[in-house]
Image: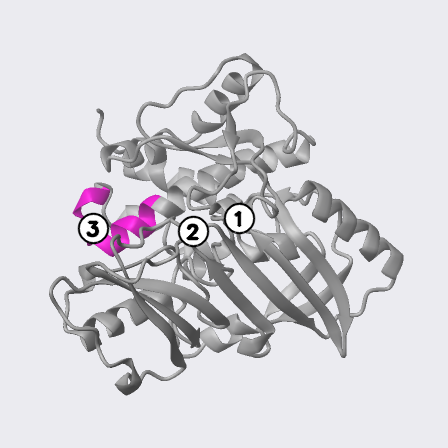
């Protein structure tokens, strides 16, 4: 494999940054209907994780259900490990959840031959332990059924309520383009720039390597999806499209009422063994990724393997209702769906959480916007 051309890589990253700007990417439903403010307070953004896992009451793994406010997932996992006196690697979770929000999620702690910690003595600001139950298996990343969102948009006045209702009906029926949210790319899109610090991504610290690979693949995906949104082909299969079921891997049987499996067109998350089904889609995919040979090479060197992600994110139980001084939205979304991607089809939003982040707080990659 040829060496990375650093100057060519810089040029590709400059072009790829356009795919990280969620506000600039084409919308499926047309221009925003109103402006508003997101996350004026943590309670304005509530996320409840449903893993589909029912702990059996016995086993080496303790499944701990928490409600957290103002804390991010990785940091809390480290705090739980410290409290339980176990290595950080012995704590797992299904997915990242928002920091500037009220969220419920489950962590599993590997405690073979150990007593349960006394959770009543846990003192972590903004964290409440709701339950702790033993299970015979750990909770793995991505092992979730869906996330349920309740979001209040403040200072939002819609000029034409009937137009809002019509658009909500379209979203409820057809879903939204399954873009990766801007949070995936880090502060000032810094995560895609990590490859300039070390073109051999394998040499980056583990967490930075994960951020860099994820950001690069996500930006490439967003750019391809944007072209499909622009020409209206994002929601229906074209000749040669690879079809992927959007049935969550961790979905429990009783979740059928929320997400009945459907095979949808899926775009590439770049890695080794790139292949397509043929037809017009194969040509479009090949042409798109050919624009970024240095980025693709860096991902392959890092061991990234090709996978796919559906182009259309379906929602369940989507509602939008007036609130004093704003609107309240609620919906359920499967793994990998960003709430901000749903909201952008309706509103142009100022995220108050980002105002907080302009101070000393951390903007943790991938958490704001709830990668569901």
Q: Which numbered disc, 3 or 1, marks the residue closer to the eye?
A: 1
Q: Which mark is residue 143?
A: none
Q: Which of the marked residues, 2 or 3, is nearer the chain's N terminus?
A: 2
Q: Is residue 343 above or below residue 295?
A: below
Find residue 291 and report its horizontal and vertical position in percent. Answer: 45, 28
Mark 3 lies on residue: 204
Q: Is residue 7 above or below residue 334?
A: above
Find residue 31 and report its horizontal and vertical position in percent. Answer: 75, 50
Can residue 194 be seen from the camera position used here?
Answer: no
Q: Which of the marked residues, 3 or 1, is nearer the chain's N terminus?
A: 3
Q: Which numbered disc, 1 or 2, marks the residue closer to the eye?
A: 1
**Circle 2: is it few (<14), some (14-19), or many (20+) Cα within 10 Å?**
many
Q: CA distance from mark 1 to mark 2?
A: 13 Å
| Position of residue 207 in the picture relative to residue 129 (left or right) | left
Mark 1 lies on residue: 254
Q: Which numbered disc, 2 or 3, marks the residue closer to the eye?
A: 2
x 51%, y 32%: residue: 245
Q: Quadrant of residue 329?
A: bottom right
Find residue 231 and report its horizontal and vertical position in percent. Answer: 68, 30
Mark 2 lies on residue: 144
């Amino acid at each position: 494999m040829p060496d990375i051309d650093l100057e060519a890589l810089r040029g590709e990253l400059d072009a790829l940054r356009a795919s990280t700007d969620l506000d600039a990417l084409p919308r499926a439903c047309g221009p925003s209907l109103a402006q508003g403010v997101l996350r004026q307070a943590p309670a304005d953004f509530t996320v409840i994780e449903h893993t589909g896992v029912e702990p059996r009451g016995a086993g080496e793994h303790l499944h701990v259900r928490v409600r957290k406010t103002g804390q991010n997932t990785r940091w809390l996992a480290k705090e739980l490990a410290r409290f339980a006196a176990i290595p950080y690697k012995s704590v797992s979770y299904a997915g990242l959840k928002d920091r500037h929000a009220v969220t419920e999620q489950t962590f599993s702690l590997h405690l073979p031959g150990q007593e349960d910690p006394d959770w009543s003595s846990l003192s972590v600001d903004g964290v409440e332990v709701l339950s702790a139950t033993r299970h015979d298996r750990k909770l793995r990343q991505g092992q979730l059924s869906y996330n349920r969102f309740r979001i209040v948009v403040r200072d939002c006045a819609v000029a034409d309520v009937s137009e809002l209702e019509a658009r909500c009906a379209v979203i409820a029926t057809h879903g939204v383009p399954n873009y990766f949210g801007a949070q995936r790319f880090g502060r000032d899109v810094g995560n895609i720039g990590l490859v300039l610090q070390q073109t051999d991504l394998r040499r980056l610290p583990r967490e930075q390597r994960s951020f860099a690979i994820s950001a690069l693949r996500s930006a490439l995906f967003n750019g391809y999806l944007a072209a499909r949104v622009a020409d209206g082909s994002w929601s229906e299969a074209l000749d040669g499209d690879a079809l992927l079921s959007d049935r969550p891997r961790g979905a429990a049987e009783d979740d059928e009422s929320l997400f009945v499996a459907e095979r949808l067109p899926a775009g590439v998350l770049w890695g080794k063994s790139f292949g397509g089904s043929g037809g017009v889609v194969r040509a479009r995919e090949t042409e798109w990724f050919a624009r970024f040979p240095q980025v693709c090479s860096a991902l392959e060197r890092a061991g990234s393997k090709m996978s796919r992600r559906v182009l259309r994110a379906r929602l369940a139980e989507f509602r939008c209702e007036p609130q004093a001084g704003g609107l309240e939205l609620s919906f359920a979304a499967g793994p990998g769906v960003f709430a901000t991607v749903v909201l952008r089809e309706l509103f142009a939003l100022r995220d108050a959480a980002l105002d907080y982040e302009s101070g000393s707080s951390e903007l943790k990659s991938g958490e704001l916007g709830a990668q569901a």
